Image (tube, grey):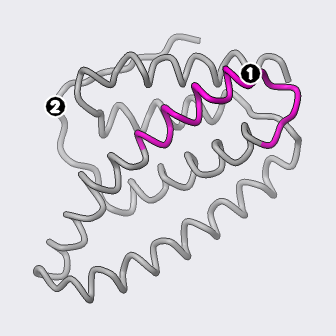
Amino acid sequence: MALSISAAAHAKPSVNDVQQCQAIIDFTIERVSSVKKYDKTDVDAVVSGLKTYEAFLQSEHVDPGLLVFTNGDKAAANDYQTQIDTFKGQMVTGLKVRHPQAQIFTDQAVAINNCYSAAPMGADKTEMMKTALETIIKLAKQG
């Protein structure tokens, strides 16, 4: 499987799209961290890369997107963030039902790669994300 990590400029994804990406990231972090057979160094590479990317999505897409949506009303933006967090939790629960096995799948790498293509970090973070995604694929192949 080839990953097409790209740092090209794109239109900003919607807050809804980003929250779906964050849910997949949350699920993947939780799952990869809970599977005992995965090498700790590999798990750390995945978790570190995905946490960095999720923080980027929050600070560069969700937070400013909510402020635009609420015309700068920080209290309303916080209320929407609470709703988003609840919905993300529901999405993670749905992913757990869909993938009850104690392993990760290449589907997660593909979904996160699609997110990254739509909302890439700076070029200085590309190698870290490539490593995280390639490691997810490596672990998925282990079963």
Looking at the rendering, in which quadrant would you find the N terminus?
top right
Among the 4 quarters of the image, the one containing residue 52: top left
Instruction: Name which of mark 1 and mark 2 comes first in the sequence.
Output: 2
Depth check: give the residue in front, 137 or 111. 137
Looking at the rendering, in which quadrant would you find the C terminus?
top right
Vertical arrangement, residue 54 with respect to residue 6, above or below: below
The residue that mark 1 highlights is 139
The residue that mark 2 highlights is 9
Vertical arrangement, residue 86 with respect to residue 98, above or below: below
Among the 4 quarters of the image, the one containing residue 117: top left
Return the x and y of residue 81 as percentages of the image width and height: 39, 75
* Part of the protein shown in magenta: 34-53
Residue at 58% from the left image edge and 48% from the top image edge: 24
Q: How many marks?
A: 2
Return the x and y of residue 89 as percentages of the image width and height: 62, 68
Secondary structure, mark 1, is: helix
Residue at 77% from the left image edge and 21% from the top image edge: 39
Depth check: give the residue in front, 107 or 63. 63
Disc 1 crowd, CA 10 A, few/some/many (<14, 14-19, 20+): many
Residue at 42% from the left image edge and 21% from the top image edge: 128
Residue 84 is left or right of residue 12, and the answer is right
Return the x and y of residue 76 as percentages of the image width and height: 27, 88
Residue 40 is left or right of residue 111, and the answer is right
Q: Amino acid at mark 2?
A: Ala
**As drawn, which residue projects farthest toward the left?**
71
Identify the main secondary structure in magenta.
Answer: helix
Residue at 79% from the left image edge and 52% from the top image edge: 98
Residue 17 is left or right of residue 8, and the answer is right
**As drawn, which residue projects farthest toward the top?**
2
